[in-house]
């Protein structure tokens, strides 16, 4: 006889235990958390489609129905096919009793659920799975969901992330395309890490139940349509779309994040995007992140910083810093801040800059150079002289390993070249809506090593 399961868990879409039945006493509720962690890992792996996961000697077999996960945990070697068939039979029985199996029906009928689980499985072995037989001796009244009275979503246009009846005197949409540049440069001036993380942040003030369509200069879409654009087309990686109240449950699969939630709880119609790369959605009211993405290709650092250290004596050091903007002249970086590490025992600092201002920040053991406005194609310099205790001067400079850190923001500029080709708002009342688009590039983890 095949091995028995240890427990059966009913989980909500966030992995929280709704109901669980322990049959053998050799697992605990912690197994549900471990299962959900493994489930997210399986979603990340595009080659993994198995309904079975194994972790630390425990086998997890599961199915999903609506917004509920049905999962068994077993320490013995079970017949996976028979257990998965059993879980589907459990779904059929619950639907017979409650009309529909959802999180709500489980919460409303937990007494009946426990009675059914006790009869359907004994000491981890499947028993009765026919609803008609079970209904002969489990006659506890069950709350049946009134599914038939629910109008379909296509008729009511009701969505979980947006309320009905929203009204604004002025209909507007604000879209911010924000990119963070992550750069790591070694002491030889070689870029050893480079990527861009982007986000499309929206603020919507729209009446009714509008349908929005967004077009980007996405290479896959443009090539499929045989179209060209004035700028360059880009390749977006690790795309993740808005998921309503379930943002923490996204797991990337291939280039598009697949979510562990039903399609009707997503803002963006993922199936349509996968089919023709169209970003179509009914927006939530107010602020939300429509999409995040990443570009792993090497990028040219917008601001390049070089530092030269000269030792005039054992107790006197001069540092020359050059900062060069490597973007086009029509753009301007604002609030540039370059943090240069200096020894903790530096004294008598003498600082000169060709642009901006610099000061010593002893709490950070650093020299901070601030430039309020840094146009493209410009180069500025900063020189700093300081003294060290003569006894420890050589050791102090050789042990300093903190990198140069750079902060900046470049309005109306994206380093990836992403462009919003169009943003359409369609609503049955045919009102005119004003879309506003803004581009911003910021420094993320932007570091240049000295040694």
Image (tube, rainbow, N blue to C red):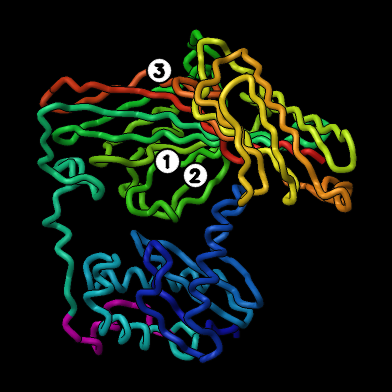
Q: Tell me residue 380's x, y (percent).
A: 65, 19
State the residue position of label 2.
257
Which callout, 2 or 3, points to the residue nearer the camera? 3
Q: Which of 388 and 440 is in front in this view?
A: 388
State the residue position of label 3.
421
Q: Residue at horizontal 63%, vertical 19%?
A: 354
**Going by the image, does 137 lie left or right of 354?**
left
Q: Nearer the viewer, residue 429 or 26?
A: 429
Q: Earlier in the sequence, mark 2 or mark 1?
A: 1
Q: Would you say residue 70 sits in the magenta stretch?
A: no
Contact (Cβ within 8 Å) of mark 2 with mark 1: yes
**Going by the image, does 289 lie left or right of 180?**
left
Q: Residue furthest front?
A: 348
Q: Residue at horizontal 63%, vertical 79%?
A: 77
Q: Can residue 329 be seen here?
A: yes
How many residues crowd around disc 2 within 10 Å: few (fewer than 14), some, or many (20 or more)? many
Residue at mark 2 to residue at mark 3: CA–CA distance? 23 Å
In the image, the segment drawn in magenta is 127-141
**Going by the image, does 290 lie left or right of 317?**
left
Q: Earlier in the sequence, mark 3 or mark 1?
A: 1
Describe the element under mark 3 as helix, strand or loop: strand
How many residues crowd around disc 1 within 10 Å: few (fewer than 14), some, or many (20 or more)? many
Q: Nearer the viewer, residue 107 or 358?
A: 358
How many residues crowd around disc 3 within 10 Å: few (fewer than 14), some, or many (20 or more)? few
Quadrant for the C terminus in the image: top right
Describe the element under mark 1 as helix, strand or loop: strand
Q: Which label sits on residue 412?
A: none
Q: Tell me residue 111's x, y (percent).
A: 26, 84
State the residue position of label 1.
241
């Amino acid at each position: 006889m095949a091995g028995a399961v240890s427990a059966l868990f009913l989980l909500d879409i966030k992995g929280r235990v709704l109901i669980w039945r322990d049959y053998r006493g050799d697992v605990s509720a912690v197994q549900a958390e471990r299962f959900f962690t493994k489930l997210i890992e399986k979603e990340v792996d595009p080659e993994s489609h198995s309904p079975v996961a194994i972790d630390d000697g425990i086998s997890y077999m599961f199915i999903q129905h609506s917004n509920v996960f049905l999962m068994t945990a077993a320490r013995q070697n079970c017949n996976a096919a028979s257990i998965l068939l059993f879980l589907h039979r459990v779904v059929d029985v619950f639907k017979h009793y409650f009309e529909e199996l959802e999180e709500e029906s489980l919460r409303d009928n937990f007494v009946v659920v426990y009675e059914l689980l006790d009869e359907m499985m004994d000491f981890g072995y499947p028993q009765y799975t026919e609803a008609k037989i079970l209904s002969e001796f489990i006659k506890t009244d069950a709350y049946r969901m009134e599914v038939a009275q629910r109008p379909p979503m296509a008729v009511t246009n009701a969505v979980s992330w947006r309320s009905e009846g929203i009204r604004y005197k002025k209909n507007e949409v604000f879209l911010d395309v924000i990119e963070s540049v992550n750069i790591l440069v070694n002491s030889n001036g070689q870029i050893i890490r480079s990527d861009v993380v982007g986000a499309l942040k929206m603020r919507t003030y729209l009446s009714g139940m509008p349908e929005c369509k967004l077009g980007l200069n996405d290479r896959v879409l443009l090539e499929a349509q045989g179209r060209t654009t004035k700028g360059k087309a880009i390749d977006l990686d690790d795309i993740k779309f808005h998921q309503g109240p379930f943002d923490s449950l996204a797991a990337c699969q291939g280039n598009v994040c697949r979510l562990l939630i039903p399609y009707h709880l997503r803002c963006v119609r993922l199936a349509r995007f996968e089919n023709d790369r169209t970003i179509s959605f009914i927006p939530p009211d107010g602020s939300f992140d429509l999409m995040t993405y990443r570009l792993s290709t090497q990028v040219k650092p917008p601001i390049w910083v070089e530092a030269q250290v000269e030792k005039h004596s054992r107790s006197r050091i001069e540092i020359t810093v050059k900062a060069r903007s490597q973007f086009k002249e029509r753009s301007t970086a604002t609030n540039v801040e370059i943090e240069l590490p200096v020894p903790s025992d530096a004294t008598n600092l003498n600082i000169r800059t060709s642009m901006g201002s610099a000061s010593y920040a002893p709490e950070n053991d650093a020299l901070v150079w601030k430039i309020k406005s840094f146009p493209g194609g410009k180069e500025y310099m900063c020189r700093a002289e300081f003294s060290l205790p003569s006894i420890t001067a050589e050791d102090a400079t050789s042990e300093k390993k903190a990198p140069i850190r750079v902060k900046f923001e470049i309005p109306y500029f994206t380093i990836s070249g992403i462009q919003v080709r169009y943003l359409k708002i369609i609503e049955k009342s045919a009102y005119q809506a004003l879309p506003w688009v803004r581009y911003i590039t910021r420094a993320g983890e932007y570091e240049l090593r000295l040694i």
